[in-house]
Image (cartoon, rainbow, N blue to C red):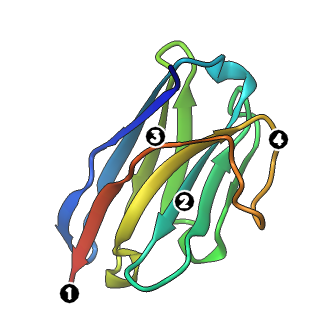
Amino acid sequence: QVQLAESGGGLVQAGGSLRLSCAASGFTFSTYWMYWVRQAPGTEREFVASIKYSGTYTSYKDSVKGRFTISRDNAKNTVYLQMNSLKPEDTAVYYCAADRAYRRSSLTYEYWGQGTQVTVSS
């Protein structure tokens, strides 16, 4: 049974920080790219960040570069998203996802979590 369980979301003031976690099970975590994707109310889902199997390569949406950091701990089957200098426009449901390939324009990943709400107040 494949599971991706996000945690760490919540309410934070603009300029604050949150650390999201996603615990994975049911597949060989270290052979999958991991992704963070977000969806704000009334919008389409958008790519936020990706990380390769052992963390040797990362990629970010331009608007979060320098503020967000994706990382992974393969021993714990967990991927993280450290979010600093948060802005109200970062408010969204954040999802983790897994796929054996790298893709960021077509968000057709194999596995998805149920999401965690991040709300940034002004």
Residue 12 position in % (x across, y down): 19, 67
Residue at 46 percent across and 48 percent down: it is 81
Q: Is residue 16 above or below residue 20?
A: below
The kind of residue on which mark 2 rests is Val
Give the Cα separation between the discs numbered 4 and 3.
19 Å
Q: Is residue 122 above or below residue 52?
A: below
- Pointer 1: residues within 10 angstroms few (<14), some, or many (20+)? few
Q: Is residue 44 above or below residue 58?
A: below
Q: Quadrant of residue 23?
A: top left
Q: Is residue 58 above or below residue 23?
A: below
Give the Cα separation between the discs numbered 2 and 3.
12 Å
- Pointer 2: residues within 10 angstroms few (<14), some, or many (20+)? many
Q: Which residue is mark 2?
A: 37
Q: Is residue 118 left or right of residue 77?
A: left
Of the image marks 3 and 1, the number of the one nearer the N terminus: 3
Residue at 52 percent across and 25 percent down: it is 2
Of the image marks 2 and 4, the number of the one nearer the N terminus: 2
Of the image marks 4 and 3, the number of the one nearer the N terminus: 3
Give the Cα separation between the discs numbered 2 and 1.
22 Å
Name the element at disc 2.
Answer: strand
Residue at 42 percent across and 86 percent down: it is 42
Give the Cα separation between the discs numbered 2 and 4.
15 Å
Q: Which residue is mark 3?
A: 80
Q: Which residue is mark 1?
A: 122
Of the image marks 1 and 4, the number of the one nearer the N terminus: 4
Q: Nearer the viewer, mark 2 or mark 3?
A: 2
Q: Nearer the viewer, mark 1 or mark 4?
A: 4
Q: Which residue is mark 4?
A: 101
The kind of residue on which mark 3 rests is Tyr
Name the element at disc 4.
Answer: loop
- Pointer 3: residues within 10 angstroms few (<14), some, or many (20+)? many
